[in-house]
Image (cartoon, rainbow, N blue to C red):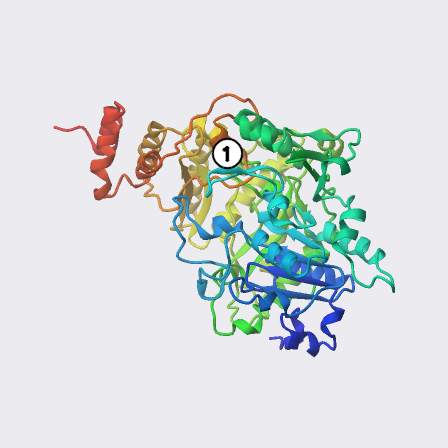
């Protein structure tokens, strides 16, 4: 077990800065985070801090600053030479704080002891405004999922209104969207070039004037400062979207398509005599670049200041390994591809094994890796066989409505990782906690060897890497609803369940298949949920892993829910919106509970579906 000193973490206080032999006027970048500081590659502030540190910069992190008192947390380290960086945390703050029914959550997973009072609503805005009030001439840069998904006009479910780009409300000078390693390094290098003996500190004016061309960043400028270039994509203005919901839906299609291209266009949107400009993203990272991010000297532990306190999100991931980035599933309700991109970037086997060996040295490691996965567990090293075809493609999903014939679905590289990890000293077993895509396992390609690898992977996954329960996400049983969700037909889930049950019998195992389902998704009606209840009853499922659809910024489903139109067809789409409508759908998950029976029967009578009452509860004598 490795012994760490306080200086092995990035400094969080003036005392910790001095322990490194620095003074506060030497700090290059000061990061503010809505999450607790866990020095681990799954926590964004730690990643950005370590990336900048690797560039030779002096970086400090102020986690969960107190925004209610005399604001001493915002003043204690003074001003940085280059900029303040702000992230709301690993989740959108409103998703973090509220349920789909807009009730306060009982726990904040990214806060010591799960306390729910350690971050404000919209920390990106709150922290930025405070810093601008104290240090008006210091640049402020936003990043993280909250800023990324709110970079243009977006619907906010919790306020039930369209909001402008978060740049307008926060007063920040620049926004980094997506995974931030490359843009933050590009920003820091350009910022350094603007400094001299006469100007040892970068000013907000200098950033707004000279740093406008970094890929994967967005900025706000006055209308007269905006210079269109050939190829710019001009969205409907914020004001036009406020007047016409169909224009908001139409905007989103273009935003999503540009987010999923190899070579995207610059996007511009006018708002209140200003223009939000979104530069195209960087191309997907190279494997060496991703390895570099994961190989930085993380302690993999919470900062010592939290000693004795439980951080729920850390408990969940401390023995897990992320093996790739990105997801080409394109699920309509998911923000992963919008933030990480649809092109898979995989770590090398050497980098993965190095991290596994570090995990084995943690003090309470018992030999079990809790997850060897990623956004989707089984997309490791899957990509287009002909890259030129991918360069021209703007499909948001590589596997919906059908798996692209150019996609290599070979599971052999993933099997190699599993076996290499399990062969390491100190590893008793590695589990797959991330959700798996059974449509990839069932896919029949023209290559017999690839099909053989999928079958081999399926058997090895079920017999060696399931900790009693395997999570999958069919999401619904209605093919019509599944099409809106961009998910495969439910018949594929039923086929996979038969394989799962057969392999369990053959291996003499008693494992469970745990399906995830969503109610109140756009396109879903009460009878769809009632039929879901009938089908899951036939399959002998008593559902536990269920959720009510929550509209979150920058997804196809949210735009359809808010506008009433599907962004790709501009045809009307029904959504359950009122509390009564949403509860009426959700109750069907729990048809087996005696206390739900009367309401369900009454609801089915109301919509004239006696046939479904008979299937759920049997015909009355």
Q: Whole-percent x and y of residue 374?
A: 58, 49
Q: Residue at x 74, y 42 (%)?
A: 283
| Residue at x 73%, y 53% (from the top left corner) | 184
Indicate whether 171 appears above or below 404. Answer: below
**Which residue is labeled 1 in the image?**
557
Q: Where does residue 65 sit, x and y in percent of width and height?
A: 56, 64
Left or right: residue 244 compared with residue 208:
left
Given the current orientation, which residue lies at the most extreme right position? Answer: 197
The picture quadrant where one finds residue 398 is top right
The relative height of residue 5 versus residue 128 in the rendered view (above or below) is: below
Which residue is farthest left? 621
Q: Is residue 514 visible?
A: yes
Q: Position of residue 173 (x, y in %)?
A: 70, 50
**Quick one: 217 or 466, which is closer to the camera?**
217
Q: Is residue 45 left or right of residue 66?
A: right
Report whether residue 411 is seen.
Answer: no
Camera-side residue of 64 and 243: 243
| Image position, residue 571 (x, y; %) | 51, 21
On the rendered image, what quadrant is the C terminus found in?
top left
Image quarter where the N terminus lies is: bottom right
């Amino acid at each position: 077990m490795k012994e760490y000193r306080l200086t092995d973490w990035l400094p969080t206080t003036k005392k910790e800065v001095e322990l490194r032999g620095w003074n506060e006027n030497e700090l290059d970048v000061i990061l503010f985070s809505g999450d607790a500081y866990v020095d681990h590659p799954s926590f964004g502030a730690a990643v950005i801090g370590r990336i900048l540190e690797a560039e030779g910069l002096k970086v400090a992190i102020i986690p969960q600053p107190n925004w209610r008192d005399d604001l001493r947390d915002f003043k204690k380290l003074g001003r940085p030479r280059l900029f303040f960086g702000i992230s709301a945390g690993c989740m959108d703050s409103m998703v973090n704080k509220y349920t789909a029914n807009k009730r306060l959550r009982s726990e904040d997973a990214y806060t010591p002891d799960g306390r729910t009072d350690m971050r404000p609503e919209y920390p990106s805005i709150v922290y930025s405004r405070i810093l601008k009030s104290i240090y008006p001439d210091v640049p402020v840069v936003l990043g993280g999922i909250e800023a990324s998904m709110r970079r243009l006009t977006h619907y906010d479910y919790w306020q039930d209104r369209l909001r402008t780009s978060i740049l307008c409300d926060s007063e920040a000078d620049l926004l980094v969207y997506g995974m931030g390693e490359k843009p933050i390094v590009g920003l820091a290098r350009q910022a350094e070039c603007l400094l001299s003996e006469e100007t040892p500190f970068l000013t907000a004016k200098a950033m707004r004037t000279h740093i406008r061309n970094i890929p994967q960043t967005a900025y706000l400028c006055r209308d007269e400062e905006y210079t269109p270039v050939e190829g710019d994509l001009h969205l409907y203005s914020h004001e036009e979207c406020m007047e016409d919901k169909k224009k908001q839906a139409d905007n989103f299609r273009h935003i999503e398509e540009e987010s999923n291209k190899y070579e995207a266009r610059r996007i511009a949107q006018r708002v209140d005599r200003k223009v939000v400009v979104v530069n195209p993203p960087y191309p997907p990272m190279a494997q060496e670049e991703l390895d570099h991010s994961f190989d930085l000297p993380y302690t993999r532990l919470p900062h010592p200041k939290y000693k004795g306190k439980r951080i729920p999100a850390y408990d969940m991931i401390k023995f897990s390994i992320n093996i790739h980035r990105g997801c080409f599933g394109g699920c309509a309700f998911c923000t992963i591809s919008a933030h990480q991109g649809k092109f898979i970037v995989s770590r090398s086997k050497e980098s993965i094994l190095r991290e596994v060996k570090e995990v084995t040295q943690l003090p309470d490691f018992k030999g079990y890796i809790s997850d060897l996965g990623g956004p989707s567990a089984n997309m490791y090293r899957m990509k287009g066989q002909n890259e030129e075809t991918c360069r021209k493609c703007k499909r948001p999903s590589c596997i919906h409505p059908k798996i692209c014939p150019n996609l290599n679905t070979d599971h052999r590289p993933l099997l190699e990782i599993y076996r290499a990890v399990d062969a390491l000293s100190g590893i008793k077993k590695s589990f797959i906690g991330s959700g798996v895509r059974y449509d990839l396992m069932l896919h029949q390609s023209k290559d017999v060897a690839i099909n053989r690898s999928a079958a081999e992977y399926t058997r090895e996954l079920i017999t060696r890497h399931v900790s009693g329960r395997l999570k999958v996400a069919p999401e619904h049983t209605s093919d019509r609803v599944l099409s809106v969700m961009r998910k495969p037909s439910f018949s594929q889930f039923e086929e996979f369940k038969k394989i799962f049950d057969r392999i369990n019998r053959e291996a003499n195992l008693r494992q469970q298949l745990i399906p995830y389902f969503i109610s109140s998704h756009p396109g879903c009606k009460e009878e769809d949920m009632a039929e879901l209840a009938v089908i899951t009853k036939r399959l002998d499922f008593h559902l536990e892993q269920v959720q009510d659809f929550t509209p979150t910024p920058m997804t196809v489903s949210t735009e359809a829910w808010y506008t009433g139109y599907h962004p790709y067809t501009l045809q009307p789409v029904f959504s359950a919106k009122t509390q009564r409508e949403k509860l009426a759908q959700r109750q069907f998950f729990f048809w087996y509970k005696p206390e739900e029976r009367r309401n369900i029967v009454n609801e089915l009578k109301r919509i004239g579906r006696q046939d479904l009452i008979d299937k759920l509860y049997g015909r009355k004598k």
